[in-house]
Amino acid sequence: TVVGISLISLFLSEVPGLSHLRLMRAFRVVRLFGRLASLRQIINALTASILPVFNAYIIMLLVTSIYAIIGVTLFSDGSPDEFGTFSLALFTMFQVATGDGWASEIARPLIFQDHPTSVLPKVNIASTFFFVSFVVIVGWSLLQV
C-alpha cells in the first residue's frame, strides 16, 4: 500500500495533499514493535499505565479546582490579577503546582502583608496554610504516579 501511494503521487502530482501521504512510510517502523519482544514489552507497559496516569490527572484537576475556588474566595480582592476569576485562579494554581515562580510572584506577596524584607513582616497564616497545603497535596498526589 505504501509503494502504491508513492506511485500514485508520482503520476498524479496535481492532486493536493497526495504527496503528504508518502509520510506514511515512516510508520513502517511501527511493525518493528511487533517483532522485537523488548520493544513490545515497553509498549505494553506504556499502554497499561495510561489509565492510572489519567486517574491521577483527574484527581489533580479536582484538587486544583477546589483550591482555585478557595483562592478566588480568599484572594480575589487582594490579588485580582491572579485570583480575580476562576479561570485566572485555576491557571495560578497550575503555576503553583508546576513551581513556575510561584514563591516570589504569587505566594510571597499574599503571605507577607508588609514588605518581605522588613525586619518582622506580618505573616498571613491563612495564606501560608493555603499554599503549603496545596504544594504538599500536589506533591504527594503526583508522587503516587
Image: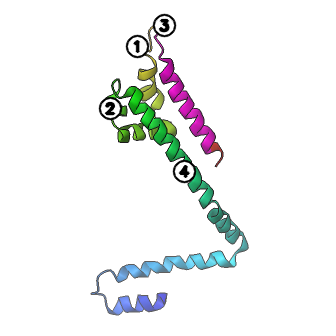
Whether the residues at callouts 1 and 3 have beta carbons within 8 Å, the answer is: no
Kind of element beneath mark 3 = loop
Kind of element beneath mark 2 = helix
Nearer the N terminus, badge 1 or badge 3?
1
Residue mark closest to the camera, 4 vs 1: 4
Q: Is residue 30 left or right of residue 24?
A: right
Q: Residue at x 48, y 39 (%)?
A: 66
Residue ID for mark 1: 115
Q: 4 or 113: which is nearer to us? A: 113
Whether the residues at callouts 4 and 1 have beta carbons within 8 Å, the answer is: no
Nearer the N terminus, badge 2 or badge 4?
4
Nearer the N terminus, badge 2 or badge 3?
2
The spot of residue 89 in percent (x, y) is 39, 37
Residue ID for mark 2: 81
Residue ID for mark 4: 57
Q: Is residue 102 above or below residue 125?
A: below
Q: Residue at x 57, y 39 (%)?
A: 138
Residue mark closest to the camera, 2 vs 3: 2
- Please check the rendered image and state whether residue 130 is part of the magenta-colored stretch, yes or no: yes
Around disc 4, counting alpha carbons within 10 Å, would you say few (fewer than 14), some (14 to 19), or many (20 or more)?
some
Image quadrant in which you'd find residue 4: bottom left
Around disc 3, counting alpha carbons within 10 Å, would you say few (fewer than 14), some (14 to 19), or many (20 or more)?
few
How far apart marks 1 and 3 lie (CA) works out to 9 Å
The spot of residue 72 in percent (x, y) is 39, 32
Whether the residues at callouts 3 and 4 have beta carbons within 8 Å, the answer is: no
How far apart marks 4 and 1 lie (CA) works out to 37 Å
Kind of element beneath mark 4 = helix
- Please check the rendered image and state whether residue 61 is part of the magenta-colored stretch, yes or no: no
Nearer the N terminus, badge 3 or badge 4?
4
What is the magenta range? Answer: 120-142
